[in-house]
Image (cartoon, rainbow, N blue to C red):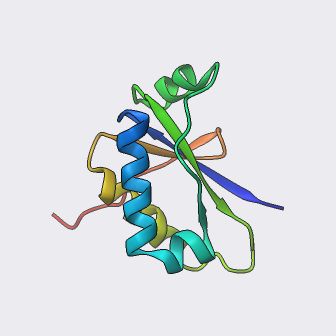
Amino acid sequence: MTISYFGHSALPRRQTQDLIDALRRRNGDLFVTRFHLHDATPLGPFGAEIARDFGIEARSRFMIAVTDKERLDGLDDALDRIYRAFGAGRLIISWELDRVRPPYQTNS
């Protein structure tokens, strides 16, 4: 069984894809091997409405798949790296399409 997270990006699809590609290059151990970071896609028929409910005006989205439930260690770090790559206010990650996984917390 796959556990899925969805990134709802306020950036256009091309810019979102560029960030995904950079994350894969820099962190292949996380985003290619351990957790599958999928390509950016259009929002789909209800994607904008779903993202708006999560508090973001999304323009594209992508999926992060956890295919091995026995290897969840490192998941929080992986999701935090994605948030950092996109920057504040440009991304919301949700568990499935049900609940927001909040951005990392800074120590300030």
How many numbered badges does the structure rendering display? 0
Residue 18 lies, in percent from the top left, at 37, 51
Location of the N terminus (image quadrant): bottom right
Q: Which residue is drawn at 64% across and 75% down?
A: 72
- Identify which residue, 73 or 36, lies in the foreground: 36
Residue 25 lies, in percent from the top left, at 41, 71
**Residue 12 sits above or below residue 22 on the image:** above
Task: Determine whether, in the image, residue 28 is placed left or right of residue 106.
Answer: right
Task: Determine whether, in the image, residue 22 is placed left or right of residue 73.
Answer: left
Residue 47: quadrant of the picture: top right
- Identify which residue, 64 or 28, lies in the foreground: 28
**Residue 53 sits above or below residue 27 on the image:** above
**Residue 97 sits above or below residue 81 on the image:** above
Residue 13 lies, in percent from the top left, at 43, 36
Q: Which residue is drawn at 58% across and 80% down?
A: 73
Q: Residue furthest right?
A: 1
Q: Residue furthest left?
A: 108
Task: Determine whether, in the image, residue 49 is placed left or right of residue 89.
Answer: right
Residue 75: quadrant of the picture: bottom right
Location of the C terminus (image quadrant): bottom left
Q: Residue at x 50, y 29 (%)?
A: 51
Q: Residue at x 37, y 62 (%)?
A: 22
Residue 94: quadrant of the picture: top right
- Identify which residue, 96 or 32, lies in the foreground: 32
